[in-house]
Image: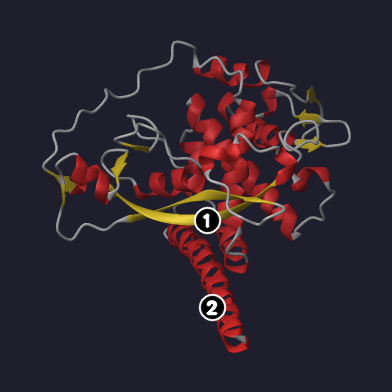
Amino acid sequence: MKTQVKKASKGKRASRAQTKESVADIYGRFTELIIEKLEEGVIPWRQPWHDMGLPANYLTKKPYKGINLWVLLSLRYEYPFYLTYKQAQELGGQIRKGAKSIPICYWNFTYRDKETGKTVPDSQVGHYPLDKLRRSGFLKEFRVFPIEQIDGIKWELPDATKTNELPVLGRCESIYADMLNPPKLIHRGTEAFYRTDLDQITMPEKRLFRTSEEYFGVFFHELVHASGHEDRLGRVGITTPQRFGSENYSREELVAEMGAGYLNNLTGILNDQLLENSAGYIRYWLEQLRNDSHLIIEAAGNAQKAVDYILMKCPF
């Protein structure tokens, strides 16, 4: 019996090691995808959206979020729609020979009874008191194909995105005006920054910027920072003082960059000036990503939460 117990214990340890290894592999694969694009001079979080909208699953119509959004945007396929192999088969389609799948990742969760340690089925979770449950998350990966690499399906595609009735700058202004619990905004000096202790964004006057689009591009960056205040999302990069250049500082800057990229796209201000690539900027993020394979996925997830909070009451 003792020998059997030892073998079972080793098996459990091996299983846990494999799980950890697979999660690390997922982080690594997505980091390499983004690094590859940066090395090509493409900044994924500065990619314009397709005329037909955000990358989405063709069958469910749900847009991809977080890191999946930026990976798919950076690939620039003809149409922004994707299917898994199984979904394509269900629709009577066939993946074209030689087609390459694209990795998509998502978080899944399991629930266990704190006393017994037994897994609680999703259907029963709602019947358990929250203090009796232990939740653990794990990263999973699946693969999708762009629809132009799938044959045998008569695609029903939407018209190109119609222009929003609200003028571009009106959309920019409404982002802040309609935000739930917005930070204070003042115009002073020549620098833009967010102060956590005052919950205040300081911006130079609009006349000091070359264009209104440039002004709002900077403002959205600071607004994403403000979303991390303890009275909003309580993000570590904002609630805890960060030393310039530290790991958490870099994480928070990437969150603000990605969140601002989303808002720039949404409002329609992503023009050539905001798309302009900087060799120094790209080198900086290449170094950060090579040093931390978790950075890009976690930053993209936090940026998505920031955007979702900012747009909670947005009218468009």
Residue sitting nearer the eye, 281 or 225: 225
Q: Which of 15 and 41 is in front in this view?
A: 15
Q: Nearer the viewer, mark 2 or mark 1?
A: 2
Which circle marks residue 139 in the picture? 1
Residue drawn at point x = 18 percent, y = 61 percent: 98
| Numbered badge on residue 11 | 2
For badge 2, the amino acid type reads Gly
Residue 67 coordinates in the image, percent (x, y): 50, 48
Furthest residue toward front: 1
Q: Which amino acid does label 1 sit on?
A: Leu
Q: Say which residue appears at 60% left-offset and 81% top-offset.
A: 5
* Spot occupied by residue 20 in the image (x, y as percentages of width and height): 56, 68
Residue at position x 15%, y 44% in the image: 93
Give residue 103's quadrant in the image.
Answer: bottom left
Q: Could you give the CA–CA distance between mark 2 and mark 1, rounded to whole angstroms? A: 21 Å
Q: Is residue 202 above or below residue 105?
A: above
Residue 171 in sight here: yes
Q: Could you tell me which secondary element the residue under label 2 belongs to?
A: helix
Circle 1 crowding by C-alpha within 10 Å: few under 14, some 14–19, many from 20:
some
Image vertical order of residue 76 relative to residue 311, above or below = below
Left or right: where 278 falls relative to 133: left
